[in-house]
Amino acid sequence: MNQDRKNYIGGSDIPAILGISRWKTQLQLWAEKTGEVDVEDISHIEAVELGTELEDFVAKKFERKTGMKVRRAPKLYAHKIFSYMGCQVDRLVEGTDELLECKTCSAWKAKEWEGEEIPMEYIAQVMWQLGITGRKIGHIAVLIGGQSFKYKKIYFDEAMFGAMVAKAVKFMIMVKEKTAPMAVGADNAFIQELLPESDGEIQEANDLNDKVAYRQELKMHVSELMGQLDTIEAEIKQAIGEHKGIKTDQYIVTWTPQQRSYVDTEKLKAEGLYEKYSTIKSSRVMRVTKNKEKDNG
């Protein structure tokens, strides 16, 4: 199986392709696969390191809780038809056609695992693993905040897997043809990294007229809402006065001092140090004005 990440779709990629990943959009994944941006190395991040180190603990805890025996998966698995689709599996359940995915998360995400809940991106990842390996049941075990352990089942859904494969095929065609997916809201900052320069030309794009108009309308409403928010906050602060806060039937509002550090640029300039240590970073700024040529036409 092709292990080149740019020409390979694995279990960690499929949530982004489906548009349900909280960490990466389809456009961001496309930019990585096409080489438009470098893939960030997250292996050194402590949370990632701990997740890897705790995988064995989670697997053994699952064994103790369920009485099942698990073993490490001996290989990388590939789709029977599309060789660029594949997956790695944390553990296989011995004597069955079942597998185990091990996860860790912070206590702040405990609500995502309440009752029968499983985060959507993990359901997609396990479903992908089941379809690729040809297994029928996937167990997902999670250590939450180092204090709570849960495990749940995911049953293979052939129709869902088929839809995932179809989307993966379409996505890889877009990668090969260098056709970018449509951007979403989460891409707003990323677009700056993907398209840092301009050629100086302004192009006709009448099909975007309605979107630009709607953008202007939204900006106007946002400005109005922010003005209302400022007024309400000022009134609440005035009511708090010199007290720590106020309490209503439903809310507790506090207004307390806090310290933060900042760089005194004026002092640095006076001492001749500002220019020495400052750097200029170029970025693109989007501005919208009326097209006077059309108005005069």
Image (spheres, grey):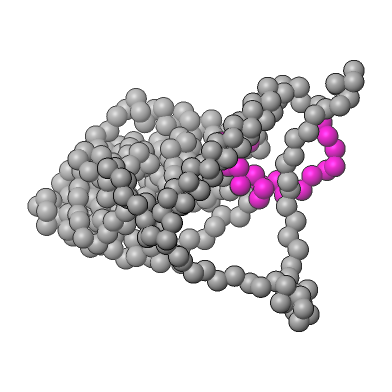
Q: Is residue 269 visible?
A: yes
Of 38 and 271, nearer the camera is: 271
Q: Which residue is at the far top?
A: 297
Q: Residue 222, position in %: x, y?
A: 58, 36
Magenta region, main secondary structure: loop
Can residue 280 be found in the magenta stretch?
no
Q: Residue at x 54, y 57 (%)?
A: 40
Query: Is 185 contained in the magenta span?
Result: yes
For the record, the magenta segment spans 180-203
Q: Nearer the viewer, residue 132 or 236?
A: 236
Q: Residue at x 56, y 55 (%)?
A: 39
Classify residue 26 as left or right of residue 178. left
At which x and y percent is residue 203?
82, 31
Image location of residue 257, percent across then percent down: 45, 65
Quadrant for the C terminus in the image: top right
- The one nearer the camera, 14 or 96, is 14
